[in-house]
Each structure stands twice: as structure tokens, then as C-alpha cells.
Amino acid sequence: MSEKEEPRVGVYTCHCGGNISDVVRCERVMTALKKLDNVVVSRTDMSMCSDAGQAMVEADIAEYGLNRIVIGACSPSLHEQTFRGTVARAGLNPYLYHHVGIREQNSWVHKDDREGATQKAIRLMAAGIAKARLLDPLEPIRLSAKRHALIIGGGIAGLRAAWDIARRGIQVTLIEKSPFLGGHMAQLESVFPTGEAARGTLHDLIDKVTGHPNVTIHTRAELVGMSGYVGDYQATIRQQSRGIKEGFTGIDKLIENCPLEVPDEFNYGLTKRKAIYTAYPGCYPPTPAVDWENCNKCGDCLKSLNGERGLISLENEPHDFDLTVGAVVVATGFRLYEPAQGEYGYGEFPEVITLAQLIRLLALNGEKELVWNGRTVHNLAFIHCVGSRQIDGINEPQPDGQVNNYCSRVCCTATLHAANELRERFPAINLYDFYEDIRTYGRGHEEYYTEASKNMVRFLRFHDDELPRVTPDPYANGTGALLVTAKDYLTWGQEIDAPVDLVVLATGVMPNPIDDIIKLLKVSPGTDRFLLEVHP
């Protein structure tokens, strides 16, 4: 369109299958808008995004010489690109299209006021037409991007991203805030639905990434500064000292000399580790790290090290360095929900543990029987949705005042996976599964439920307003046994008492605390506090 041409506007409203037209009187809107300057065509349609709806717009552009298009419909995040494609196919510049959201911003929030919603739609659409008159045709530009990507997070997702990017010839810098790579994947023994060894899969990927010439890895490193624009970012990374330099050989003696023991977070506190440690056998990097929060700098670790003392420093000396990158991948992972004190007896009874602890217990337990606190476990109960699908007023909120009302999507499958493993390894154990709903997301995951049913796992279904209760078993005679009591709605609300030796809480997942990254990168979290995807 030349500068001398007058705007010729085609304006349309979508019924959206009743989502809009059940509230907004669309014909009245079109009648009002047709009177506005430069409006040549005004129409309504049941579904503007349909092939027929788009064909109507293309035909009107050709027949009436329209050079501006305005459509009132759903959210622009859904169909703005759809309609830009429509006008482009008709020969118009796609940026001569304007989208007006009259569903989320109008009909959905004014269901009880049809007249008010109709008048609001007229005003919103009129404003859209006024803007459309001023639109200029735009052409996309291409920016050269630095062929260097920064990946934040050294878990399985970050490692996979590093490998995929690096093998396409792009430089990659991966930063991980902990001393070792692998994240939660390293703590698993097998993965569903294939049953493959988790550690083997992880190590294969780590070998590929660390051996690739395009990849540089920094552990104990965090993003502390970010500036720039698309394709050309300046990132500032702060890296904490590891304490032990690469090439140190006296690892076993070094760890043995350390007198300080702390709970081992890798095993969720089931075991102890030293204040100088490696996460697990075969971890990467293989060089130990000093736990700066717990190390008291006693110096005992330096004894009998002879010529390698120069490779150890008990002073944490962080340093900053800068990178120029063209893209940033945020793979910051998740953390497991920590049950509140007393939630299903957690923190009150030693016999109440989390599913993550059970998984590590199974990895550590080489016995022919499952043993907890020196006693054989004959009866075990799982309780689902601990820290997921929470309800205001029933569940204790998080520090930010919110409850986790979302489904974590992995806990049910992980619980069934663990139940089947227990049955295979310890055939005599009795298993109870207390659940609200079984949600086995993912292809092939439902088979875990089928297998658990065949394995004689006893399923009991509770309602969210009548949660199971965990109390000491009055007939336990000091053995630490517990009683799980719940109304089972598979048996029409019959109250069931399950005497068990161990209660396992299937805890949900929560986002890692990354407020600083959110501010630096200006990315948006969703209502569940996880980062929003670009294309959800």
C-alpha cells in the first residue's frame, strides 16, 4: 500500500463456538462498527480460525481491495499468527493485521452482563480499527547471532541441550551451580518406561558432552549479570572455588582424613558424607569438592599428602568472568517437595519417608529383605499427591503463601515403578497404595498400573477432603509400626486400617528457587511458579 492510499478496513468478529457469542451480541457489534470511517466490510463468523473463516477474509481482501484487517476473537497468543498468515496469503503485508482479544478480556469475564459485554466489545473493536488505520507494513529483519550458547543447569535436560547444540557446530558454555553434573537423574537407578539404567544413560551423555570440543563446563557457577539483546548477550558468571585442583590423585586419603561428617544430600540424608566429597562413584567432575558451608578448615585433610598440598586450598575464592553469547537455555530443573512437619506423620515417626528416600534405600539395600532402622519391612504403604494438587485451607502454604494446586505429573508413575520393583525384589512384602487419582502421564506408563495390579498391590482411593491419617499402631508392641487409616471409596467409603512398617510419601516437584535468574533474563513464571514455555 502506498502512503497516499486510504485505509480500507475489513473487520470481523468470531463467535468462537459460543464462547464469545453466548455473551456478546456479535451482530450488534458489527452494525455499530460498520458506521466507522474506513470500514468497508464487517462480518461475523462462527469460527474465524477455521479454513472457511480464513477463506472468507482472503476473498474479501481480493474483492473489496481491503488493506487493513481487524479480527475480534480469542487471545492473540493463540491465533494472531494464524490470521497474519491469512492476510499474507491474500497478498497483504502480515503486519497490516490487528488482533483484538474479546474472549479472555471480555466475554469470559462478563458472562452475567451481556449488554455491558456488547458495549465493551464495540469499544475494544473501535480502538482496534483506530490502530489499524495507523499501521505501516513491516518487513522482518535478520540479526546475526553469536554462535555461542549459554546453558544454565547441568542436569539431564541441560546436558542434552548442550549435546544437541554443540554437534551443530555452535560453541556451548554450560554452568552448573552444584559441584557435580547429573542432577536428579544421577540419583535414580532406572528410568521409565524403558527400565534402562539411569546412571548408564547419564554417563553416556556426560561422556559425549565433556568430550566434545565445542563444550566448556563450569561447575559451582551461577549467572549473576546479563545485558544485551537478541543474538548478542553479555553474561557475567560467578564461579566458586572447588578447593581441590584438577589432577589431584590422593582422593581416597584426602576424604578419609576429613573428620567432619554431614548428612549426604545425594542419598536424601540416609547416609553420611565427609565435608570433602564426591557425589557418587563415577561422578563428573571426578575431582572432589570442599563443602564450604560445613568445612571448618581444621586442616586434617592436608595430612600425609606430601607433594600434592599445593593442589588444595581451604579458602573459597570466587571469581567472575564474562561471556558473549547468542542464546541462553534455562534448564534449572526442579526440587522435591519437603513435607511439612507432621504431614502424614513426616518428621514425627522415623518410619515415614519420601519416595525419593525409598528409591535411594533400594539402591543401597543389598539385603534379601527390605530393612529400615534395623527391622524388616513386611508391610508398606504409599500415599500419593503429597505436595501436589493441594487445596487452600487444607494444605499448609509455601513460604510465598501459595499452595501447590497443580499435578506434578511424574509421582504416580514413579510410585508404581517403585511398587513393582519392591514386588520383584521382595515378593513377600505387602503393599498398600492410597491414592486420590492415578495419573500415569506418558505413553506406556499406564502399564505400570496394570503390572502393579497383577502384583497384588492393594489400591485404596481417598477423597481430597478426607485424607489418610497416619498414627502409631496400638498393637505394635514398640516395633515402630504405624497404622494408615482412610475411607476407601473403591469400597463405597468403608474405613480401612492398614498396619504397616513403613509409610512412603509420593512427593511432588517444585521449581528451583531461581528468582535472580527470572529477574536477570526477564522471563516469566506461570501460576505454578515454573517458567513458562515459549510455546506451551
Image (cartoon, helix red, strand yellow):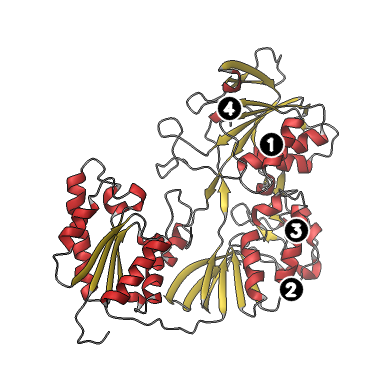
Real-space Cα separation, disc 1 to disc 2, in angstroms: 40 Å
- The residue drawn where x is 35% and y is 79% is 93
Identify the residue under disc 1.
449
Identify the residue under disc 2.
211
Q: Position of residue 401 (x, y in %)?
A: 39, 41
Q: Residues within 10 Å of mark 4 (few under 14, many from 20)?
A: many
Q: Position of residue 368 (x, y in %)?
A: 86, 33
Label 1 element class = helix
The disc placed on residue 345 is 4
* Chain-order first, disc 4 or disc 2: 2
Label 4 element class = helix
The quarter of the picture where the N terminus appears is bottom left
Identify the residue under disc 3.
201
Q: Quadrant of residue 52?
A: bottom left
Label 3 element class = helix
Real-space Cα separation, disc 3 to disc 4, in angstroms: 36 Å
Real-space Cα separation, disc 4 to disc 1, in angstroms: 26 Å
Q: Is residue 98 shown left or right of residue 266?
A: left
* Chain-order first, disc 1 or disc 2: 2
* Chain-order first, disc 3 or disc 1: 3
